[in-house]
Amino acid sequence: MGYRVFLMPKTNRGYISRYFYALLRVNKVSKYEIFVRKELLYMNIPITVTQKQLSEFLLNTAVVRPVFIWGPPGIGKSALVQQFAESLGLPCVSLLGSQLAPEDIIGVPQIVDGLSRFCPPKMIARKEPYCLFLDELNACTQEVQKAFYSLIHEHRVGEYVLPEGSIVIGAGNRAQDSAIVKPMSSALINRMLHVQLKVSHRDWLEWASANGIHPYVYEYITMRPDHLWTEPPKTEEPFSTPRSWHMLSDALNEYGDNLTDEALEILAYSCLSPHHAGQFKAFIKQIKNRYQLAAIIDGEERWPDKPEDRDVLYFLSQSFRSQLIKQLPVEKNAMNEKQKMLAHRAKALIKELSLISLEMAQMVVSKYGDDEGLPGWFMVDIVRDLPRLVERKED
């Protein structure tokens, strides 16, 4: 038994562009079967839901049918299920799929009156209703997945039946998240409702305000909500998720007033994506130096122009760009008076910024990847002025 590589037919490449090659351990398996198995690794649901939407969804579905929650690591799937169970007054029993063997589900055989019967584990065989949370279900081996069939579909393990009112919820990461996942059989998939969770900075900030998240973290995500979560990297390095920001908050709370600049740098780079860690460090420096973006926009302060404050200037420039994208409307005729004042002030600030760093001024107005960028009507005015700014910079 070895590895066989199949190149998908050209007619299919547009549909499965990310599956040009299927590299699987196979033993006389057809190309169609390989394609299906690969598809089962990549669960792509066209509709995603926020934490609040998922809670409402679970309230109306999990009580009657098992639900599987898909999503990248660190976005709060497990915590949300725990909170949902608590809201129903049910204890939550979590099973980590990647660490289970079949006997952990179906139990071990026992001879009773000359007949064999399986005794389910104590943590599953309860007398009162509860929430059974099957975490990392799609990281289980095929044997463990088979052991879950009757538990998920019929709420039964051997002769034991879950108490009436019990609910079953599964969760797992996606293959595109560089996570360890295994194909789920179509039979198992078809036994559950499926929903894909996305990160909502509004939901997270609402939760953070009530759960003791450190003020530095809360203020930073308020200013840079786009830094709350990032795609898992292809290399082995920390990356930003709601969970990693929570970890950073816990560490900052533990340090208290003993936090030094060196400790802050170590903490940030140990939890967050490198780019976000550098930005967070600059944000804290900005707070200590009292450089506030709001004060700069209001004309009470100026852009920092000292060489040692370049990291702060970079952070402020990025935050300024995010604020403009968030507050300026797509259509110019849709502006209110406050937005008109912001647009007028923004043009002046970009000019001032270009005198300090043309690179950062261009960064504010540039479009990156799939982000929305600044409104077209605003860019018309900026592009018209940029040549003069360049000439003035060179003088």
Image: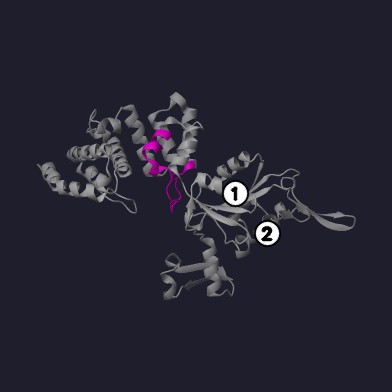
**Quadrant of the frame with the C terminus:** top left
Viewed as shown, does residue 113 lie left or right of 35? right
**Quadrant of the frame with the N terminus:** bottom right
Residue 237 among those drawn in magenta: yes
Report if the CB atoms under discs 1 and 2 are less than 8 Å apart: no
Identify the magenta region: 217-242
Tell me which residue sits at (20%, 41%) in the image.
Answer: 347
Determine the secondary structure under disc 1.
Answer: helix
Give whichever of discs 1 and 2 has the lower sequence position.
1
Q: Is residue 360 visible?
A: yes
The residue carrying pointer 1 sits among few (fewer than 14), some (14 to 19) or many (20 or more) residues within 10 Å by Cα, namely few
Disc 2 marks which residue? 149
Disc 1 marks which residue? 60
Percent position (x, y) of residue 79?
56, 42
* Dot 1 amino acid type: Asn
Q: Is 4 drawn above or below residue 270 in the view shown?
A: below
* Dot 2 amino acid type: Tyr
Nearer to the camera, 14 or 339: 339
